[in-house]
Amino acid sequence: MNEGGKEIKKSKTYHFHQEWEEDFLFTMSHSKCVCLICRSSIALPKKGNVERHFRMVHRTFDTDFPPSSELRKRKVRELKSQLLGQQSLFTRPTSKAKAATEASFRVSRTIVRHKKCFQDGVMVKEAFIEASDALFKEFKNKTEIMSAVKAVQLTRNTVTRRCEMMGDNLVQQLAKDIDCCECFSLQMDESTDITDKAQLCIFIRMVHDMTAKEELLTVLHMNAHTRGEDIFQIFKTFIDKTKIPVCKLVSITTDGAPAMVGCRNGFVAKCREDEAFPDFLSYHCIIHQQALCAKMLNMKEIMDVATKVACSIRAKSLQRRLFRLQLEEADSDHTELLLHTDVRWLSRGKFLQRFRDLLPEIKQFLQEKKHAEYEQLNDDRWLLDLAFLTDVSNMLNELNVELQGKEKLVINMISTVNAFKGKLKLLSSKIQRHDLGNFSNLASELNNQEKDSTEFDSACYAKQIDTVLSDFDRRFQDFALLEPVATFMCFPFREDAEIDVLASKISTMFQLSSAEVEDEILTLQADINLKARANEQFWSLLTEEKYPNMRKCATSLTAMFGSTYLCESAFSHMKIIKSKYRSTLTDDHLEACLRLTISSYCPDYASLVDSIQCKSSSE
Protein backbone atom coordinates (compact mmCIF):
# COMPACT_ATOMS: atom_id res chain seq x y z
CA MET A 1 0.00 0.00 0.00
CA ASN A 2 1.02 3.64 -0.53
CA GLU A 3 0.81 6.49 2.00
CA GLY A 4 -2.88 7.13 1.17
CA GLY A 5 -3.80 3.55 2.00
CA LYS A 6 -4.51 2.61 -1.61
CA GLU A 7 -3.22 -0.69 -2.92
CA ILE A 8 -0.62 -0.41 -5.67
CA LYS A 9 -1.18 -2.79 -8.57
CA LYS A 10 2.01 -4.65 -9.55
CA SER A 11 2.91 -4.72 -13.24
CA LYS A 12 3.13 -8.21 -14.78
CA THR A 13 6.08 -9.51 -16.74
CA TYR A 14 5.38 -11.76 -19.73
CA HIS A 15 7.84 -14.28 -21.12
CA PHE A 16 7.94 -15.95 -24.50
CA HIS A 17 7.56 -19.75 -24.48
CA GLN A 18 9.61 -21.75 -26.95
CA GLU A 19 6.77 -24.06 -27.91
CA TRP A 20 4.90 -21.12 -29.47
CA GLU A 21 7.28 -21.31 -32.43
CA GLU A 22 5.71 -24.53 -33.65
CA ASP A 23 2.21 -24.01 -32.23
CA PHE A 24 1.58 -20.41 -33.37
CA LEU A 25 4.55 -19.65 -35.69
CA PHE A 26 6.00 -16.85 -33.51
CA THR A 27 9.60 -16.22 -32.40
CA MET A 28 11.55 -13.61 -30.45
CA SER A 29 13.71 -11.28 -32.54
CA HIS A 30 15.50 -8.21 -31.11
CA SER A 31 13.27 -8.30 -27.99
CA LYS A 32 10.11 -8.40 -30.12
CA CYS A 33 7.58 -11.20 -30.63
CA VAL A 34 7.52 -11.63 -34.45
CA CYS A 35 5.28 -13.79 -36.66
CA LEU A 36 7.35 -16.10 -38.87
CA ILE A 37 4.74 -16.05 -41.65
CA CYS A 38 3.87 -12.35 -42.10
CA ARG A 39 6.66 -10.70 -40.02
CA SER A 40 4.11 -8.85 -37.90
CA SER A 41 4.99 -8.12 -34.28
CA ILE A 42 2.80 -7.88 -31.19
CA ALA A 43 3.20 -5.59 -28.20
CA LEU A 44 3.16 -8.19 -25.41
CA PRO A 45 4.30 -11.83 -25.66
CA LYS A 46 1.04 -13.22 -24.18
CA LYS A 47 -0.32 -16.56 -25.29
CA GLY A 48 -3.73 -15.04 -26.00
CA ASN A 49 -2.22 -12.40 -28.29
CA VAL A 50 -0.10 -14.78 -30.36
CA GLU A 51 -2.86 -17.38 -30.61
CA ARG A 52 -5.46 -14.79 -31.66
CA HIS A 53 -3.20 -13.52 -34.44
CA PHE A 54 -2.46 -17.04 -35.67
CA ARG A 55 -6.10 -18.18 -35.69
CA MET A 56 -7.47 -15.05 -37.36
CA VAL A 57 -4.75 -14.22 -39.90
CA HIS A 58 -3.37 -17.66 -40.78
CA ARG A 59 -6.45 -19.90 -40.51
CA THR A 60 -5.42 -22.40 -43.19
CA PHE A 61 -1.94 -23.05 -41.83
CA ASP A 62 -3.03 -25.91 -39.55
CA THR A 63 -4.69 -27.58 -42.53
CA ASP A 64 -1.68 -27.22 -44.84
CA PHE A 65 0.80 -28.09 -42.10
CA PRO A 66 -0.79 -30.32 -39.46
CA PRO A 67 0.33 -29.75 -35.83
CA SER A 68 3.22 -31.96 -34.61
CA SER A 69 3.88 -33.22 -38.14
CA GLU A 70 7.37 -33.39 -39.63
CA LEU A 71 6.15 -31.19 -42.48
CA ARG A 72 5.20 -28.43 -40.04
CA LYS A 73 8.55 -28.65 -38.22
CA ARG A 74 10.42 -28.31 -41.53
CA LYS A 75 8.29 -25.32 -42.48
CA VAL A 76 8.98 -23.62 -39.12
CA ARG A 77 12.74 -24.11 -39.59
CA GLU A 78 12.54 -22.76 -43.14
CA LEU A 79 10.58 -19.64 -42.10
CA LYS A 80 12.92 -18.97 -39.18
CA SER A 81 15.97 -19.30 -41.44
CA GLN A 82 14.43 -16.84 -43.90
CA LEU A 83 13.84 -14.32 -41.11
CA LEU A 84 17.44 -14.57 -39.89
CA GLY A 85 18.74 -14.25 -43.44
CA GLN A 86 16.62 -11.20 -44.07
CA GLN A 87 17.91 -9.55 -40.91
CA SER A 88 21.54 -10.31 -41.81
CA LEU A 89 21.08 -8.46 -45.10
CA PHE A 90 20.60 -5.29 -43.06
CA THR A 91 23.22 -5.92 -40.36
CA ARG A 92 26.04 -7.27 -42.57
CA PRO A 93 26.70 -4.04 -44.51
CA THR A 94 26.82 -2.12 -41.23
CA SER A 95 29.34 -4.53 -39.67
CA LYS A 96 31.46 -4.45 -42.84
CA ALA A 97 31.48 -0.66 -42.81
CA LYS A 98 32.49 -0.65 -39.13
CA ALA A 99 35.31 -3.10 -39.80
CA ALA A 100 36.54 -0.96 -42.70
CA THR A 101 36.43 2.15 -40.52
CA GLU A 102 38.35 0.48 -37.69
CA ALA A 103 40.94 -0.73 -40.19
CA SER A 104 41.19 2.85 -41.43
CA PHE A 105 41.92 4.05 -37.88
CA ARG A 106 44.53 1.35 -37.30
CA VAL A 107 46.38 1.93 -40.57
CA SER A 108 46.27 5.70 -40.05
CA ARG A 109 47.89 5.26 -36.63
CA THR A 110 50.62 3.12 -38.17
CA ILE A 111 51.27 5.77 -40.82
CA VAL A 112 51.54 8.49 -38.17
CA ARG A 113 53.71 6.41 -35.79
CA HIS A 114 56.19 5.91 -38.62
CA LYS A 115 56.19 9.69 -39.11
CA LYS A 116 54.87 9.49 -42.67
CA CYS A 117 52.69 12.12 -44.32
CA PHE A 118 48.90 11.77 -44.46
CA GLN A 119 49.00 11.35 -48.24
CA ASP A 120 50.87 8.04 -47.82
CA GLY A 121 47.55 6.41 -46.92
CA VAL A 122 46.75 6.25 -50.65
CA MET A 123 50.03 4.46 -51.34
CA VAL A 124 49.48 2.03 -48.44
CA LYS A 125 46.03 1.12 -49.76
CA GLU A 126 47.36 0.63 -53.28
CA ALA A 127 50.11 -1.64 -51.94
CA PHE A 128 47.56 -3.52 -49.82
CA ILE A 129 45.36 -4.14 -52.86
CA GLU A 130 48.30 -5.34 -54.97
CA ALA A 131 49.50 -7.68 -52.20
CA SER A 132 46.00 -9.04 -51.56
CA ASP A 133 45.52 -9.74 -55.26
CA ALA A 134 48.55 -12.05 -55.16
CA LEU A 135 48.09 -13.52 -51.67
CA PHE A 136 44.44 -14.51 -52.08
CA LYS A 137 44.59 -15.59 -55.73
CA GLU A 138 43.55 -19.19 -54.99
CA PHE A 139 40.97 -18.32 -52.32
CA LYS A 140 37.34 -19.07 -53.16
CA ASN A 141 36.18 -15.88 -51.43
CA LYS A 142 38.81 -13.69 -53.10
CA THR A 143 36.16 -11.31 -54.41
CA GLU A 144 34.80 -10.75 -50.91
CA ILE A 145 38.31 -10.23 -49.49
CA MET A 146 39.24 -7.74 -52.20
CA SER A 147 35.97 -5.91 -51.62
CA ALA A 148 36.80 -5.60 -47.90
CA VAL A 149 40.31 -4.31 -48.67
CA LYS A 150 39.03 -1.73 -51.14
CA ALA A 151 36.45 -0.55 -48.59
CA VAL A 152 39.14 0.81 -46.24
CA GLN A 153 39.15 4.63 -46.34
CA LEU A 154 42.71 5.99 -46.57
CA THR A 155 42.53 9.22 -48.53
CA ARG A 156 44.63 12.16 -47.35
CA ASN A 157 41.66 13.92 -45.74
CA THR A 158 40.47 10.71 -44.08
CA VAL A 159 43.88 9.94 -42.55
CA THR A 160 44.04 13.55 -41.33
CA ARG A 161 40.65 13.26 -39.61
CA ARG A 162 41.58 9.89 -38.11
CA CYS A 163 44.77 11.44 -36.70
CA GLU A 164 42.78 14.29 -35.14
CA MET A 165 40.22 11.95 -33.57
CA MET A 166 42.80 9.52 -32.19
CA GLY A 167 44.82 12.41 -30.78
CA ASP A 168 41.73 13.72 -28.99
CA ASN A 169 40.99 10.22 -27.69
CA LEU A 170 44.49 9.93 -26.17
CA VAL A 171 44.06 13.35 -24.55
CA GLN A 172 40.83 12.12 -22.93
CA GLN A 173 42.59 9.03 -21.57
CA LEU A 174 45.37 11.23 -20.21
CA ALA A 175 42.86 13.55 -18.52
CA LYS A 176 41.30 10.58 -16.70
CA ASP A 177 44.70 9.43 -15.44
CA ILE A 178 45.57 12.93 -14.24
CA ASP A 179 42.31 13.09 -12.30
CA CYS A 180 42.98 9.68 -10.71
CA CYS A 181 46.66 10.17 -9.86
CA GLU A 182 47.84 11.14 -6.38
CA CYS A 183 50.50 13.58 -7.61
CA PHE A 184 52.49 14.46 -10.71
CA SER A 185 55.62 16.25 -11.89
CA LEU A 186 56.45 18.07 -15.11
CA GLN A 187 59.47 18.35 -17.36
CA MET A 188 59.59 20.99 -20.06
CA ASP A 189 61.92 22.27 -22.73
CA GLU A 190 61.63 24.61 -25.70
CA SER A 191 62.94 24.25 -29.22
CA THR A 192 62.18 25.57 -32.70
CA ASP A 193 60.77 23.60 -35.62
CA ILE A 194 61.70 23.82 -39.31
CA THR A 195 59.76 27.10 -39.65
CA ASP A 196 61.54 28.68 -36.63
CA LYS A 197 58.36 28.57 -34.56
CA ALA A 198 59.06 27.95 -30.87
CA GLN A 199 57.49 24.73 -29.55
CA LEU A 200 57.28 24.22 -25.78
CA CYS A 201 57.17 20.50 -25.05
CA ILE A 202 55.77 19.40 -21.67
CA PHE A 203 55.76 15.86 -20.27
CA ILE A 204 53.95 14.68 -17.15
CA ARG A 205 54.84 11.86 -14.75
CA MET A 206 51.80 10.69 -12.78
CA VAL A 207 51.82 8.37 -9.77
CA HIS A 208 48.86 6.26 -8.71
CA ASP A 209 49.25 3.54 -6.07
CA MET A 210 53.06 3.92 -6.29
CA THR A 211 53.02 3.20 -10.03
CA ALA A 212 54.37 5.91 -12.31
CA LYS A 213 53.31 6.68 -15.88
CA GLU A 214 55.03 9.14 -18.23
CA GLU A 215 53.09 10.83 -21.01
CA LEU A 216 53.21 13.85 -23.29
CA LEU A 217 51.04 16.50 -21.64
CA THR A 218 51.01 19.03 -24.46
CA VAL A 219 52.99 20.97 -27.02
CA LEU A 220 52.43 24.72 -26.65
CA HIS A 221 53.11 26.83 -29.72
CA MET A 222 54.77 30.22 -29.19
CA ASN A 223 54.53 32.62 -32.11
CA ALA A 224 56.49 35.54 -30.66
CA HIS A 225 58.77 35.90 -27.61
CA THR A 226 59.95 33.00 -25.44
CA ARG A 227 60.61 34.92 -22.23
CA GLY A 228 59.73 33.44 -18.85
CA GLU A 229 56.58 35.53 -18.57
CA ASP A 230 55.48 34.48 -22.08
CA ILE A 231 55.99 30.81 -21.26
CA PHE A 232 54.08 31.24 -18.00
CA GLN A 233 51.13 32.99 -19.65
CA ILE A 234 50.66 30.35 -22.33
CA PHE A 235 51.06 27.55 -19.76
CA LYS A 236 48.61 29.22 -17.37
CA THR A 237 46.06 29.56 -20.19
CA PHE A 238 46.49 25.87 -21.00
CA ILE A 239 45.95 24.59 -17.44
CA ASP A 240 42.92 26.87 -16.97
CA LYS A 241 41.39 25.60 -20.21
CA THR A 242 42.03 21.91 -19.50
CA LYS A 243 41.32 22.21 -15.74
CA ILE A 244 44.50 20.37 -14.76
CA PRO A 245 44.65 20.02 -10.94
CA VAL A 246 47.94 21.87 -10.34
CA CYS A 247 47.41 21.31 -6.61
CA LYS A 248 48.92 17.84 -7.25
CA LEU A 249 52.15 19.30 -8.68
CA VAL A 250 55.33 18.09 -6.94
CA SER A 251 58.21 19.34 -9.09
CA ILE A 252 59.19 20.93 -12.39
CA THR A 253 62.39 19.97 -14.23
CA THR A 254 63.73 22.28 -16.95
CA ASP A 255 66.80 22.74 -19.13
CA GLY A 256 68.12 25.45 -16.82
CA ALA A 257 67.76 28.29 -19.35
CA PRO A 258 67.31 31.80 -17.87
CA ALA A 259 63.79 31.97 -19.30
CA MET A 260 62.97 28.93 -17.18
CA VAL A 261 64.88 29.41 -13.93
CA GLY A 262 65.48 33.16 -13.79
CA CYS A 263 65.14 34.25 -10.14
CA ARG A 264 62.70 37.10 -10.89
CA ASN A 265 61.18 36.73 -14.35
CA GLY A 266 61.80 33.05 -15.03
CA PHE A 267 58.95 30.64 -15.66
CA VAL A 268 59.46 28.79 -12.36
CA ALA A 269 59.52 32.08 -10.42
CA LYS A 270 56.26 33.17 -12.07
CA CYS A 271 54.62 29.86 -11.14
CA ARG A 272 55.68 30.28 -7.52
CA GLU A 273 54.16 33.76 -7.44
CA ASP A 274 50.80 32.44 -8.65
CA GLU A 275 48.46 31.44 -5.82
CA ALA A 276 46.98 28.58 -7.86
CA PHE A 277 50.29 26.71 -7.68
CA PRO A 278 51.31 24.81 -4.53
CA ASP A 279 54.81 24.86 -3.08
CA PHE A 280 56.80 22.72 -5.50
CA LEU A 281 60.42 21.76 -6.14
CA SER A 282 62.34 22.72 -9.27
CA TYR A 283 65.41 21.08 -10.75
CA HIS A 284 67.88 21.60 -13.57
CA CYS A 285 68.10 18.57 -15.88
CA ILE A 286 70.81 16.18 -14.63
CA ILE A 287 71.91 15.29 -18.17
CA HIS A 288 72.32 18.95 -19.12
CA GLN A 289 74.39 19.59 -16.02
CA GLN A 290 76.56 16.55 -16.72
CA ALA A 291 77.20 17.85 -20.25
CA LEU A 292 78.17 21.26 -18.83
CA CYS A 293 80.57 19.62 -16.38
CA ALA A 294 82.28 17.89 -19.31
CA LYS A 295 83.13 21.30 -20.78
CA MET A 296 85.34 22.05 -17.77
CA LEU A 297 88.15 20.02 -19.34
CA ASN A 298 90.65 22.65 -20.47
CA MET A 299 91.52 21.10 -23.83
CA LYS A 300 90.57 23.85 -26.28
CA GLU A 301 93.80 23.53 -28.26
CA ILE A 302 93.21 19.80 -28.77
CA MET A 303 89.65 20.30 -30.00
CA ASP A 304 90.57 23.23 -32.26
CA VAL A 305 93.30 21.33 -34.10
CA ALA A 306 91.30 18.09 -34.39
CA THR A 307 88.24 19.96 -35.67
CA LYS A 308 90.26 21.92 -38.26
CA VAL A 309 91.89 18.74 -39.56
CA ALA A 310 88.56 16.91 -39.83
CA CYS A 311 86.90 19.85 -41.58
CA SER A 312 89.78 20.23 -44.04
CA ILE A 313 89.24 16.63 -45.15
CA ARG A 314 85.44 16.66 -45.18
CA ALA A 315 84.83 20.21 -46.39
CA LYS A 316 85.29 19.33 -50.08
CA SER A 317 83.58 16.38 -51.75
CA LEU A 318 86.69 15.27 -53.65
CA GLN A 319 88.90 15.22 -50.54
CA ARG A 320 86.25 13.28 -48.67
CA ARG A 321 85.96 10.67 -51.43
CA LEU A 322 89.73 10.29 -51.68
CA PHE A 323 90.05 9.82 -47.93
CA ARG A 324 87.31 7.17 -47.96
CA LEU A 325 89.15 5.38 -50.77
CA GLN A 326 92.35 5.43 -48.74
CA LEU A 327 90.56 3.91 -45.73
CA GLU A 328 89.13 1.13 -47.93
CA GLU A 329 92.55 0.35 -49.40
CA ALA A 330 94.03 0.20 -45.89
CA ASP A 331 91.23 -2.15 -44.71
CA SER A 332 90.45 0.26 -41.89
CA ASP A 333 87.74 -0.58 -39.35
CA HIS A 334 86.18 2.82 -40.11
CA THR A 335 84.99 4.20 -43.43
CA GLU A 336 84.45 7.82 -42.48
CA LEU A 337 85.84 10.62 -40.35
CA LEU A 338 83.29 12.10 -37.95
CA LEU A 339 82.60 15.78 -37.30
CA HIS A 340 82.05 17.41 -33.92
CA THR A 341 79.16 19.57 -32.75
CA ASP A 342 78.58 20.89 -29.23
CA VAL A 343 74.81 20.50 -29.57
CA ARG A 344 74.98 16.71 -29.43
CA TRP A 345 75.78 15.29 -26.02
CA LEU A 346 77.88 12.34 -27.22
CA SER A 347 79.58 14.09 -30.12
CA ARG A 348 82.98 14.92 -28.59
CA GLY A 349 83.80 11.46 -27.25
CA LYS A 350 82.89 9.70 -30.50
CA PHE A 351 84.65 12.32 -32.61
CA LEU A 352 87.90 12.14 -30.62
CA GLN A 353 87.95 8.33 -30.54
CA ARG A 354 87.42 8.11 -34.31
CA PHE A 355 90.02 10.84 -34.92
CA ARG A 356 92.60 9.03 -32.82
CA ASP A 357 91.82 5.64 -34.39
CA LEU A 358 92.36 7.12 -37.87
CA LEU A 359 95.33 9.31 -36.95
CA PRO A 360 97.92 7.33 -39.00
CA GLU A 361 95.68 7.47 -42.09
CA ILE A 362 94.98 11.17 -41.51
CA LYS A 363 98.69 12.02 -41.30
CA GLN A 364 99.43 10.00 -44.44
CA PHE A 365 96.56 11.62 -46.34
CA LEU A 366 97.59 15.16 -45.38
CA GLN A 367 101.18 14.45 -46.41
CA GLU A 368 100.27 12.90 -49.79
CA LYS A 369 97.74 15.60 -50.74
CA LYS A 370 100.06 18.38 -49.55
CA HIS A 371 97.50 19.93 -47.23
CA ALA A 372 98.42 22.56 -44.67
CA GLU A 373 100.81 21.07 -42.15
CA TYR A 374 99.67 20.52 -38.58
CA GLU A 375 102.77 20.30 -36.43
CA GLN A 376 100.70 19.20 -33.44
CA LEU A 377 100.01 15.82 -35.07
CA ASN A 378 103.68 14.98 -34.57
CA ASP A 379 104.04 16.59 -31.16
CA ASP A 380 104.34 13.97 -28.39
CA ARG A 381 102.78 16.15 -25.69
CA TRP A 382 99.84 17.09 -27.90
CA LEU A 383 99.22 13.44 -28.73
CA LEU A 384 99.26 12.52 -25.03
CA ASP A 385 96.76 15.29 -24.32
CA LEU A 386 94.57 13.99 -27.16
CA ALA A 387 94.67 10.46 -25.73
CA PHE A 388 93.82 11.69 -22.22
CA LEU A 389 90.94 13.84 -23.46
CA THR A 390 89.61 10.90 -25.48
CA ASP A 391 89.65 8.62 -22.43
CA VAL A 392 87.86 11.10 -20.15
CA SER A 393 85.34 12.03 -22.86
CA ASN A 394 84.50 8.36 -23.35
CA MET A 395 83.86 7.99 -19.60
CA LEU A 396 81.58 11.04 -19.64
CA ASN A 397 79.77 9.58 -22.65
CA GLU A 398 79.12 6.36 -20.75
CA LEU A 399 77.65 8.37 -17.88
CA ASN A 400 75.48 10.35 -20.27
CA VAL A 401 74.09 7.22 -21.91
CA GLU A 402 73.35 5.68 -18.50
CA LEU A 403 71.37 8.78 -17.48
CA GLN A 404 69.29 8.75 -20.66
CA GLY A 405 66.09 6.76 -21.12
CA LYS A 406 62.46 6.65 -20.09
CA GLU A 407 61.02 5.92 -16.65
CA LYS A 408 64.23 6.82 -14.81
CA LEU A 409 63.69 7.38 -11.09
CA VAL A 410 65.42 10.48 -9.77
CA ILE A 411 66.82 8.33 -6.93
CA ASN A 412 68.59 6.07 -9.43
CA MET A 413 69.92 9.03 -11.42
CA ILE A 414 71.38 10.60 -8.28
CA SER A 415 73.03 7.27 -7.45
CA THR A 416 74.53 7.10 -10.94
CA VAL A 417 76.00 10.60 -10.64
CA ASN A 418 77.38 9.88 -7.16
CA ALA A 419 78.99 6.69 -8.44
CA PHE A 420 80.69 8.66 -11.22
CA LYS A 421 81.92 11.28 -8.75
CA GLY A 422 83.48 8.47 -6.74
CA LYS A 423 85.04 7.15 -9.94
CA LEU A 424 86.57 10.58 -10.68
CA LYS A 425 88.16 10.67 -7.23
CA LEU A 426 89.64 7.24 -7.83
CA LEU A 427 90.87 8.19 -11.32
CA SER A 428 92.60 11.30 -9.97
CA SER A 429 94.38 9.21 -7.37
CA LYS A 430 95.33 6.46 -9.82
CA ILE A 431 96.72 8.77 -12.50
CA GLN A 432 98.91 10.50 -9.91
CA ARG A 433 100.33 7.05 -9.14
CA HIS A 434 100.81 6.54 -12.92
CA ASP A 435 98.25 3.73 -12.88
CA LEU A 436 96.72 3.82 -16.39
CA GLY A 437 94.38 0.84 -16.06
CA ASN A 438 91.38 3.07 -16.84
CA PHE A 439 93.14 5.14 -19.51
CA SER A 440 93.50 2.81 -22.49
CA ASN A 441 94.17 5.53 -25.08
CA LEU A 442 96.77 7.26 -22.90
CA ALA A 443 98.53 3.95 -22.21
CA SER A 444 98.45 3.13 -25.94
CA GLU A 445 99.95 6.50 -26.88
CA LEU A 446 102.76 6.11 -24.35
CA ASN A 447 103.46 2.70 -25.84
CA ASN A 448 103.54 4.19 -29.36
CA GLN A 449 106.05 6.79 -28.16
CA GLU A 450 108.05 4.02 -26.49
CA LYS A 451 107.81 5.76 -23.14
CA ASP A 452 107.33 4.36 -19.68
CA SER A 453 104.02 4.95 -17.86
CA THR A 454 105.84 7.33 -15.50
CA GLU A 455 107.14 9.60 -18.28
CA PHE A 456 104.27 12.09 -18.46
CA ASP A 457 102.93 14.99 -16.41
CA SER A 458 100.43 13.14 -14.23
CA ALA A 459 99.81 16.16 -11.98
CA CYS A 460 98.41 18.15 -14.91
CA TYR A 461 95.92 15.41 -15.81
CA ALA A 462 94.96 14.87 -12.17
CA LYS A 463 94.23 18.58 -11.90
CA GLN A 464 91.93 18.36 -14.94
CA ILE A 465 89.98 15.51 -13.32
CA ASP A 466 89.74 17.41 -10.03
CA THR A 467 88.34 20.43 -11.90
CA VAL A 468 85.58 18.30 -13.42
CA LEU A 469 84.85 16.75 -10.01
CA SER A 470 84.56 20.18 -8.37
CA ASP A 471 82.10 21.27 -11.04
CA PHE A 472 80.02 18.13 -10.43
CA ASP A 473 79.86 18.98 -6.71
CA ARG A 474 78.87 22.58 -7.44
CA ARG A 475 76.21 21.85 -10.04
CA PHE A 476 74.48 19.02 -8.21
CA GLN A 477 73.95 20.82 -4.90
CA ASP A 478 70.16 20.94 -5.36
CA PHE A 479 70.04 17.17 -5.81
CA ALA A 480 72.40 16.74 -2.84
CA LEU A 481 69.65 18.16 -0.60
CA LEU A 482 67.35 15.43 -1.89
CA GLU A 483 69.88 12.65 -1.28
CA PRO A 484 69.21 11.97 2.46
CA VAL A 485 65.48 11.64 1.78
CA ALA A 486 66.14 9.38 -1.21
CA THR A 487 68.47 7.24 0.91
CA PHE A 488 65.76 6.79 3.53
CA MET A 489 63.25 5.80 0.84
CA CYS A 490 65.66 3.09 -0.32
CA PHE A 491 66.67 1.94 3.19
CA PRO A 492 63.81 2.83 5.57
CA PHE A 493 65.08 0.54 8.37
CA ARG A 494 68.57 2.01 8.73
CA GLU A 495 69.37 2.18 12.44
CA ASP A 496 72.04 4.89 12.10
CA ALA A 497 69.62 7.43 10.62
CA GLU A 498 69.16 10.61 12.67
CA ILE A 499 65.38 10.60 12.75
CA ASP A 500 64.89 14.17 13.92
CA VAL A 501 67.20 15.57 11.21
CA LEU A 502 65.63 13.34 8.57
CA ALA A 503 62.09 14.30 9.62
CA SER A 504 63.04 17.98 9.45
CA LYS A 505 64.36 17.61 5.88
CA ILE A 506 61.31 15.65 4.72
CA SER A 507 58.88 18.11 6.30
CA THR A 508 60.70 21.09 4.76
CA MET A 509 60.86 19.53 1.32
CA PHE A 510 57.23 18.41 1.13
CA GLN A 511 55.55 20.93 3.48
CA LEU A 512 54.64 18.39 6.18
CA SER A 513 54.50 18.47 9.96
CA SER A 514 57.94 17.57 11.34
CA ALA A 515 56.45 16.00 14.49
CA GLU A 516 54.03 13.83 12.49
CA VAL A 517 56.76 12.72 10.09
CA GLU A 518 59.05 11.82 12.99
CA ASP A 519 56.27 9.82 14.64
CA GLU A 520 55.52 7.92 11.42
CA ILE A 521 59.20 7.08 10.89
CA LEU A 522 59.44 5.64 14.41
CA THR A 523 56.22 3.66 13.95
CA LEU A 524 57.37 2.36 10.57
CA GLN A 525 60.81 1.25 11.80
CA ALA A 526 59.18 -0.62 14.70
CA ASP A 527 56.69 -2.43 12.44
CA ILE A 528 57.90 -6.05 12.35
CA ASN A 529 55.41 -7.00 9.64
CA LEU A 530 56.73 -4.31 7.29
CA LYS A 531 60.33 -5.30 8.01
CA ALA A 532 59.58 -8.82 6.87
CA ARG A 533 58.11 -7.53 3.59
CA ALA A 534 60.76 -4.94 2.71
CA ASN A 535 61.17 -5.09 -1.08
CA GLU A 536 60.68 -2.94 -4.18
CA GLN A 537 56.93 -2.79 -3.52
CA PHE A 538 57.47 -1.81 0.11
CA TRP A 539 55.98 1.70 -0.04
CA SER A 540 52.78 0.49 -1.70
CA LEU A 541 52.14 -1.59 1.46
CA LEU A 542 51.81 1.52 3.62
CA THR A 543 48.20 2.55 4.20
CA GLU A 544 47.05 6.12 3.77
CA GLU A 545 45.33 6.03 7.16
CA LYS A 546 48.40 4.98 9.17
CA TYR A 547 51.23 6.58 7.17
CA PRO A 548 49.82 9.58 5.23
CA ASN A 549 53.04 11.60 5.37
CA MET A 550 55.31 8.70 4.46
CA ARG A 551 53.12 7.80 1.50
CA LYS A 552 53.12 11.40 0.30
CA CYS A 553 56.91 11.49 0.54
CA ALA A 554 57.27 8.21 -1.36
CA THR A 555 54.78 9.14 -4.11
CA SER A 556 56.38 12.56 -4.52
CA LEU A 557 59.84 11.07 -4.98
CA THR A 558 58.46 8.52 -7.44
CA ALA A 559 56.81 11.31 -9.44
CA MET A 560 59.94 13.46 -9.82
CA PHE A 561 61.72 13.87 -13.14
CA GLY A 562 65.51 13.96 -13.02
CA SER A 563 66.03 15.15 -16.58
CA THR A 564 64.34 16.56 -19.68
CA TYR A 565 65.29 13.52 -21.75
CA LEU A 566 61.71 12.93 -22.91
CA CYS A 567 61.51 16.47 -24.28
CA GLU A 568 64.81 16.08 -26.12
CA SER A 569 63.61 12.79 -27.56
CA ALA A 570 60.31 14.39 -28.61
CA PHE A 571 62.19 17.15 -30.45
CA SER A 572 64.06 14.48 -32.42
CA HIS A 573 60.70 13.01 -33.48
CA MET A 574 59.34 16.49 -34.22
CA LYS A 575 62.26 17.22 -36.54
CA ILE A 576 61.28 14.20 -38.66
CA ILE A 577 57.51 14.77 -38.49
CA LYS A 578 57.70 18.45 -39.45
CA SER A 579 60.50 18.24 -41.99
CA LYS A 580 61.20 20.59 -44.87
CA TYR A 581 58.83 18.47 -46.94
CA ARG A 582 55.98 18.98 -44.42
CA SER A 583 56.74 22.51 -43.29
CA THR A 584 53.08 23.55 -43.70
CA LEU A 585 51.91 21.04 -41.07
CA THR A 586 49.63 22.87 -38.64
CA ASP A 587 50.43 23.13 -34.93
CA ASP A 588 47.43 20.99 -33.97
CA HIS A 589 48.36 18.27 -36.45
CA LEU A 590 51.99 18.38 -35.27
CA GLU A 591 50.89 17.79 -31.68
CA ALA A 592 48.49 14.99 -32.67
CA CYS A 593 51.18 13.25 -34.75
CA LEU A 594 53.75 13.61 -31.97
CA ARG A 595 51.33 12.27 -29.37
CA LEU A 596 50.41 9.22 -31.48
CA THR A 597 54.12 8.58 -32.15
CA ILE A 598 55.38 8.55 -28.57
CA SER A 599 52.35 7.86 -26.36
CA SER A 600 51.97 4.55 -24.54
CA TYR A 601 48.19 4.88 -24.78
CA CYS A 602 46.29 2.97 -27.46
CA PRO A 603 43.26 4.65 -29.07
CA ASP A 604 39.86 3.24 -28.13
CA TYR A 605 38.97 2.07 -31.62
CA ALA A 606 35.51 0.76 -30.67
CA SER A 607 34.33 4.09 -29.28
CA LEU A 608 35.91 6.00 -32.17
CA VAL A 609 34.09 3.84 -34.73
CA ASP A 610 30.80 4.16 -32.85
CA SER A 611 31.15 7.94 -32.71
CA ILE A 612 31.04 8.41 -36.48
CA GLN A 613 28.84 7.36 -39.35
CA CYS A 614 30.64 4.41 -40.91
CA LYS A 615 31.00 4.39 -44.68
CA SER A 616 32.99 2.20 -47.02
CA SER A 617 35.43 3.67 -49.47
CA SER A 618 34.03 4.45 -52.89
CA GLU A 619 37.40 3.90 -54.49
Image: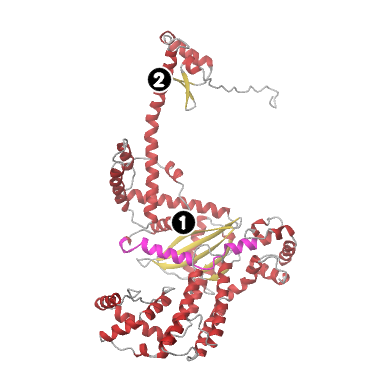
- Nearer to the camera, 237 or 54: 54
Residue located beneath label 1 in the image: 599
Q: In the image, is residue 407 above or below residue 341?
A: above
12 displayed left or right of 369? right
Q: Residue 479's spot in the image, x, y percent?
A: 58, 72
How far, Cα to Cα, is label 1 from label 2? 53 Å
Decide: is 529 above or below 429. Answer: above
Q: Which image quadrant for residue 605?
A: top left
In terms of depth relative to the viewer, which is nearer, 294 or 228? 294
Mark 2 highlights which residue? 78
Q: Which mark is residue 589?
A: none
Identify the image quadrant of the N terminus.
top right
Q: Amino acid at mark 2?
A: Glu
**576 left or right of 210?**
left
Can residue 272 be seen? no
Residue plotted at (33% across, 53% down): 118
In the rendered view of the protein, which quadrant contains the C terminus? Answer: top left
- Chief secondary structure of the magenta span? helix
Q: What segment is highlighted magenta in the picture?
A: 552-581
Q: How is the image coloured?
A: secondary structure
Q: Secondary structure at mark 1?
A: loop
The extreme top residue here reads 63
Residue 469 appears in view = yes
